[in-house]
Amino acid sequence: MKGEIRVNVLTLLLLSMASLVTEISLIRVFDVLFYPNISYMIITCSLFAYGLAGVYSVLKPMPIDGDLRNVFGKLSYLTAASVGLILPLVNLLPFDLNKLSTEALRQLAYFGGVYLALAMPFFLTGLIFSAVFTAFPKQIRSLYFWDLTGAALGSALVIPLISSVGPGGLLFFAAGLSLIASALFMNRKSWTVVVCVISLALFIVPIAYAPRYFDFKEHQGKRGVKLARERGIIEKTIWDPISKIDIINYGHLRYIAYDGGSQTSLFYPFDGDFQTLRENLPYKLTDHFWQRGVLVSHYLKEGSHPNVLVIGSAGGQEIKAALMYGAQHVDGVEMVGAVVRLGKNEYSNYIGGLFRNPLVSVYIGEGRSFLQSSNMKYDIIQIFSNHTSSSVATGTGAIATNYLQTSEAYREYFSHLTENGVLHINHFYYPRMITTAALAWSQMGRSDFEKHVVVYENDQDETLPTLLIKMQPWSTDELERVKQFFASDFPGEDIKYTLVIDPLSTENNSIPPSYFSGSLPPDAIQSSASQIEPATDDRPYFNLYEKTLNPFKNGAIQDMKHIFANSPQGLVTLYMTGIVAIFYALVFIMVPLFFSFAGKQQWHNKFNSLFYFSCLGAGFIIIEFVFIQLFMHLVGSPLYTYSTVLFTMLLGAGIGSITSDHLKITPRIRWFVPFIGILLTITVLLAIYPIAGDIFLATSLATRITVVILFIFPVSFFLGMPFPLGILSLEREPKGSVAWAWGINGLFTVIGGLLGIVSSIQWGFRITLWIACAIYALAFLFFSRIRSAL
């Protein structure tokens, strides 16, 4: 029996590793192939499949008195095969969201095939977990430890490997890990030899194939990437930990596509002659710059030799603009390291050596972290719509965190500007940018904000208006200079620019004066058809505009309709995804569970156990979701945040599970320790993090990740104890009750995920964490009733 248990824990570790590698890889893939709303489907799909596996185990339990090793070995082999089939099946089935309206039945059939391919590995893995927990309930704390530890290691494995092998290669690795688990389960010499050979090949082939990737095929066009792939004009593809980068050769320029075209930038050909470029600017604008909105702050400061900071330096057009108008020094900060390296190396000569210019320093990092670590004052701080499209850590669409557009971020910008410095931002929806900046302005003790703001819209790209905030009030001469710049004739640029916020004629402004006050009155919030409340670090959902599920119900928001139509930001998609997931979870998990043998039996603790495991599923996923969103601010990088949070939570929970055995925490004694520990550690985190987060934001990435781990680990340690405690309480309950509890837990993980999203949007992260604490307090109450009947 001891030998069998040893095999079980090692195989659980390997299968958990494979499962997390598969999940994170697919989230990144579907970010690229589609949009964040669809990548969110991977999370709900995996949770749903795990819950469904629990249902299947209840309805058709495995004979635990037989030779389970052979059964588990076959299931592990099938898991490996199902992981291996994901790439070819997704490439084979041409699912395209854009074609749903014209060929609905065909696209739904494709979607069904894709969904089945994605769900199968998680379902098979869930069957093994459920059966192992059922077969060895007394060893649940040890088994749970190895399960969670494997998942933690899997989440950490993605970061060092994704750049070299890509998500497709990571799926090879996941299949190899599952095959090794199969050999360990079966313990047959011939099968072990075969598995070792195949697994070794699965590990080596993606590495040997590098720098090329076994990649997923685009079936949906996003800004021309699919067509470029078909035409063979993609020069380079890099799976950076932040974003997938494709460099497309259009002859006259190089197009930088982030995440399959979700966002873009450009490498413009340039010979490095800034004087000639300045002299020929009216005729060469579109050969070197996206639009003249990129240039205006530099034009305003021409002759003053300003110090400039560009947050999101991308292809370098903002750096070029600054140098062309005589900047003394330019700092560029870019999160996607691959783009920086391309600009410094392969494309350095192509772009005129911008990133190697002696007046330029380009850093790989996050803008706010860079500012926090610097005492430098800048004459211009510029941000040109550089926000990452990756959702692996930030959420999906409407729930994507945007820590560059919060009141705390604007305070950081203002504090790093010189006495007459300019903050220059091109980003969509300027009314909310203004209310958010106004809050920061008032928090710094400043007044008359309306006299410091200029906004220009253009009729060709309404999603990128030009916002200029000057630390001193605009003078007549300064504003006239800006007006002349936007009114000038630039051959080749057929764009009309309109002044919509005028600091010297405020009566003509397009938004009410209350938007500039820093304290929006309730009637202004109520009368607005879209979200105008300032975004904060506690509620950093700047991209969420809708106030209802019908964002176009009145005329006031019609001007924003093109944004909603062309970007998956909306609550509608988010809520529909969540509601559909919950509906199917209820139909395919809850209903069968109640008609299973364990579900139909009348046992004393049945309903208390139902509510207990429901609370654990909902509470854990809410805390996980909030931690990912909350610590994104400190870590900065989406993938690093996601991996750090998952690694720490899973490993911490695993250690908590196995430690609870040594601490003699059982359903009879010391059972209350986990619940008190959860409440205390979250309370301490909420008290300390706001201060500590700001302090450590200025440190290195490694230090920031270490700080996040230290914050998360104590909470996670106690989070790992309640689930095995509940399983131990089922020892004398009807056959199948463990699998029944696993299914209930999985169902409410899906429900809790949506609850956490809605709560954080509505009330912020702090209140959402208190809600999670309340859920664990309810779990404490239900378990006290369970143990009283033991």
Image (cartoon, grey):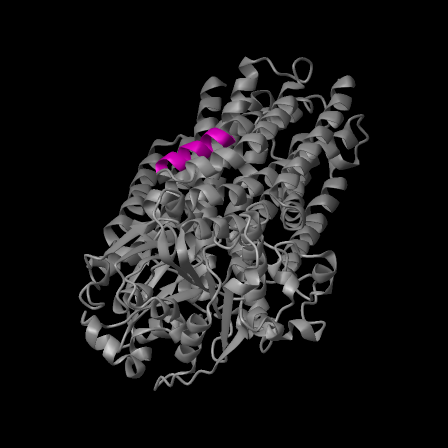
Q: Nearer the viewer, residue 472 or 183?
A: 472
Q: Position of 314 compared to 415: left or right?
A: left
In reply to whether residue 301 is colored magenta, the answer given is no
**Residue at 75% across / 27% down in the picture?**
782
The C terminus: image quadrant: top right
- 445 shown above or below 316: above
> x and y percent of residue 411 in the render?
49, 49
- Write down the region rendered in magenta: 702-712
Dominant SS of magenta comes to helix
Which image quarter: residue 739? top right
Q: Nearer the viewer, residue 607 or 681?
A: 681
Q: Is residue 134 visible?
A: no
- 298 shown above or below 80: below
Q: Nearer the viewer, residue 228 or 84?
A: 228
Q: Position of 511 compared to 85: left or right?
A: right
> x and y percent of residue 467 in the render?
48, 66
In reply to whether residue 711 is colored magenta, the answer given is yes
- 335 shown above or below 711: below
> x and y percent of residue 208 in the render?
23, 50
Q: Nearer the viewer, residue 544 or 646?
A: 544
> x and y percent of residue 606 in the render?
77, 30
**Residue at 65% across / 71% down in the picture?**
557
Q: Is residue 563 visible?
A: yes
